[in-house]
Amino acid sequence: MKLSPQTIQAAVDAAHSSSAPNIGGANANYIPYLASVPSELFGVAVMTPDGRLYKAGDTDYAFAIESISKVFTLALVTELIGSEAVRQKVGTTPTGLPFNSVMALELHNGKPLSPLVNAGAIAIVSLVSGVSADACWAKILDMQSRFAGRPIALSDEINQSEQTTNFHNRAIGWLLCSAGTCYSDPMRAVDVYTRQCSTLVTTTDLAVMGATLAGGGVNPVTRLSVVAAANIPHLLSEMTMEGLYTASGDWAYQVGLPGKSGVGGGILAVAPGKLAIAAFSPPLDLVGNSVRGQAAVAYIAKALGLNLFGS
Ligand code: GLN
């Protein structure tokens, strides 16, 4: 199907209006900040690799990136150490268990299996070299900014909210350490992982970040290459297998696009070579994925005939 600008904007508008009444789910509350974000906020955006933006709703509201950050740090580490080292040291297969599962680690001798669950993401952060936590953090923040095409910033409020409540993730850090799968000081890795979840992005930012993945690693706004084209299939395959956690299989079955969600309510899907779809709505389902966000992204994917397995 030839996707004209009018066709894409009509799909975005219809996705927004048809998903808006979908009021199921609840804000994440295990991170206090997230519980306080207005639940009715709802933004939808699409960007094509030529930099055209299509949007509806609250696309300029800045929210916590949360787990969507895992994709961009994985991109950084894949560039730094190569895709095969990622597979050996962290693993690249889905866990079939919730994103913060300790049991998943116990079942596999402390190997996280996936870079897109908390344990794997903490291990990925531990592979970012740097003399200090701040040096390591600077590289990760720079990568988020390169994907977004503008300087991304940490929210001190969100970071504070997470750093003072992240006991479960700290436990995961020590379990990785005991298994030999944390490659830096574990509390440093958890600290930096927590910061990477605490940056602020808008739905438009997510669309740009996704369009960079859709466009072979070239940012559509800056025209700079952010990640080698050869690494994009590795990132998108991880998103397909684990991007929506235990719902990833159903998502592939029903929507057929690599995706990534965060407990801040953001969600991103990538149609390689074509476009990225981003949405934001805080209420989550039991797995941890935005209810309205999933509905809106699925609507657009279907309306524009983007299912990868249907092409
Ligand atoms: N910061 C959150 C955590 O570590 C991110 C989880 C998520 O978005 N799924 O629990």
Image (tube, rainbow, N blue to C red):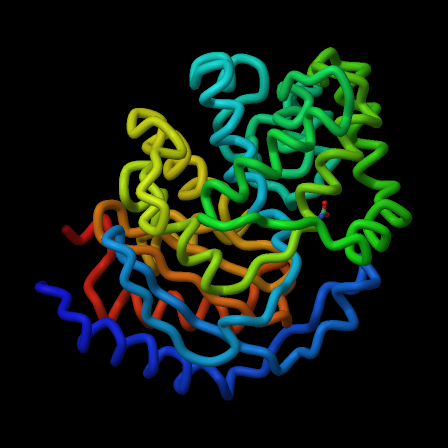
- The quarter of the picture where residue 217 lies is top left
Instruction: Please determine whether, in this image, residue 130 is positioned above or below residue 188.
Output: above
Percent coordinates x, y for residue 135 in the rendering? 71, 25
Residue at 40% across, 50% down: 210
Question: What number of labels is visible?
Answer: 0
Residue at 49% across, 72% down: 59
- The quarter of the picture where residue 306 lies is bottom left
State the residue lying farthest toward the right: 164
Instruction: Please determine whether, in this image, residue 216 is positioned above or below residue 188.
Output: below
Position of the N terminus by quadrant: bottom left
From the viewer's perspective, tell me whether residue 180 is left or right of residue 10: right
Residue at 34% across, 56% down: 276
Between residues 171 and 207, which one lies in front from this camera angle?
Answer: 207
Percent coordinates x, y for residue 149 in the rendering? 45, 48
Between residues 125 and 221, which one lies in front from this camera angle?
Answer: 221
Percent coordinates x, y for residue 230 in the rendering? 30, 25
From the viewer's perspective, tell me whether residue 186 is left or right of residue 226: right
Instruction: Please determine whether, in this image, residue 268 is positioned above or below residue 297.
Output: above
Percent coordinates x, y for residue 283 in the rendering? 63, 72
